[in-house]
Structure formats: C-alpha cells, structure tokens
Amino acid sequence: MHTSALVLFSGGQDSTTCLAHALSKYDRVETLAFDYGQRHKVELEARLNVLAAMQARFPTWAPKMGDDHLLDAGILGQISETSLTRDTAIAMESSGLPNTFVPGRNLLFLTLAAALAYRRGLQVIVTGVCETDFSGYPDCRDDTMKAMQVALSLGMDRKLLIETPLMWIDKVQTWQLAHDLGQKVDASGGGQALVDLIVEHSHTCYLGDRTQRHDWGYGCGQCPACQLRVVGYRRFRR
Ligand code: ZN
C-alpha cells in the first residue's frame, strides 16, 4: 500500500494537476523542482505561489503537503550550450523535436528524484510526462518511464513506483482532470476553484512572459507551450 509520494513539480499546468492527483491519493506528498538555469525561471517563483494557493484554498490537502525541494541541475546548461555543435542542434529541430530539447534531461531528473525519494522514504514518484502532446520527447515515453522504474528500483534495491497520470490524456482532459480532482475534495466549488488557481498561478510559457494575462492565464500566447495551453483551455471551456 502506497501512502507517500514525491511530485515533480515545476509550477506548470501539468505538474499542478499531478500535485492535485497525488494529494487526492496519498497521505504525505512532497514536491521537487530543478533549477538548471532555464529561461522560464519565473516558473520557479510561480510554483511557490501555486503551493501557497493550494494550501490556502484546500484545507483537506494542506496538512498532507510536506517539504518542497529545489535541486540544482545546472550541469544540464553546460551540456545543452557548449557540448552540442550547431549542426546537431539544427538536426534535432528538423527531426521534429523543439530546440528546447535537452537530451536525456528527464532521465537525469528521475534519477535525482529517486535518490531524494529514497532519502525521504517516499514510495511513489509522480510526473506529468505525456505521450499525447506535440513534443514527442523520447525521455517522456511510457516505455521509458517503465524502464526507468525497473532500473531505479533495482539500482536502489527498493521498490519505486513511477506514476504518470497524464500519460495518455490531452490538454483538454488535463483541465478536466484538475476540475474533477478539485470537485472531489470540495464538492462546493472546488473544481472551479482549482481550475481558477491553475489559470492564475501556474506558469507554462517558454518565454517566461507573465506580463500578459489572458482568460487561460499568463503567457506570450505564441510559443508552443502557450499554444497548447490556449487550445486546451478553449476546448475545455466549450
Ligand atoms: Zn509563451
């Protein structure tokens, strides 16, 4: 019986929904983010606002929310900026992967998360990876997750579960899932409240733009991450 989880929580729409998922299921939930000099550093601030808002609005969840962790993964910046040739970067773009792609990033994140989970005695890692969205990151595939679960469980000699509640759903269903989870924990308006909280506080935009407020939240409205969020939100609202 699993009772505790570590959520990979970047402060975006997906990981906020994963956090709600974990809080609806487990007694103790801790959160983790990585600082690797990302452009959307504004995400790191947004995530603290999301955590505070969740605690304030959902008193059933608040006592389950444990420590929040921030790990330095700055080494990724060295790999993506200096070790790749210009040709390689262009080749990756032409293969359909966004130029934000950092090879194996998620493998490193999961390994660090597993080490932290081990130390903290947490049994489950929850991550918002998804095969349905546009990006097609190979380190977010379901098969990759299953292989990592086996490798990490063996390598740490402790059974570790990697849970991916968003793996097979699209952005519309992700909004719907957030709504359902909020409603389940608070039948008097919790669904709408969680959707509103995600709109207001979660951050998705690759450019880190929080100067423009739309009905779907803050962002430039143009980058791939914003576009996904806009389309999903519009269809969810229909
Ligand atoms: Zn954007």
Image (cartoon, helix red, strand yellow):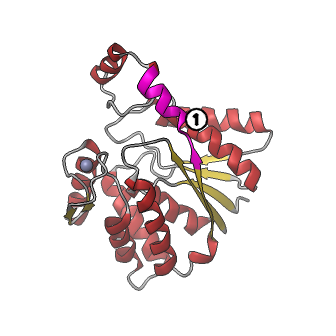
Span shown in magenta: 71-82
Quarter of the image where one finds residue 65: bottom right
> Residue at image x 37%, y 66%?
201
Q: Is residue 149 left or right of residue 23?
A: right
> Residue at image x 35%, y 63%?
176
Task: Look at the picture and state if 32 lies above or below 145.
Answer: below
Element carrying mark 1 = helix
Residue 80 lies in the magenta stretch: yes
> Residue at image x 74%, y 48%?
118
Q: Position of residue 120 (x, y in %)?
A: 74, 55
Task: Look at the picture and state if 30 lies above or below 86.
Answer: below
The residue nearer to you, when weighing 38 against 63, is: 38
Q: Position of residue 143 (x, y in %)?
A: 54, 32
Read off the residue under disc 1: 108
Task: Look at the picture and state if 51 lies above or below 82.
Answer: below
Q: Amino acid at mark 1?
A: Leu
Quarter of the image where one finds residue 233: bottom left
Query: Disc count in the image?
Result: 1
The residue nearer to you, when weighing 27 against 6, is: 6
Q: Is residue 142 left or right of residue 147?
A: left
Quarter of the image where one finds residue 29: bottom right
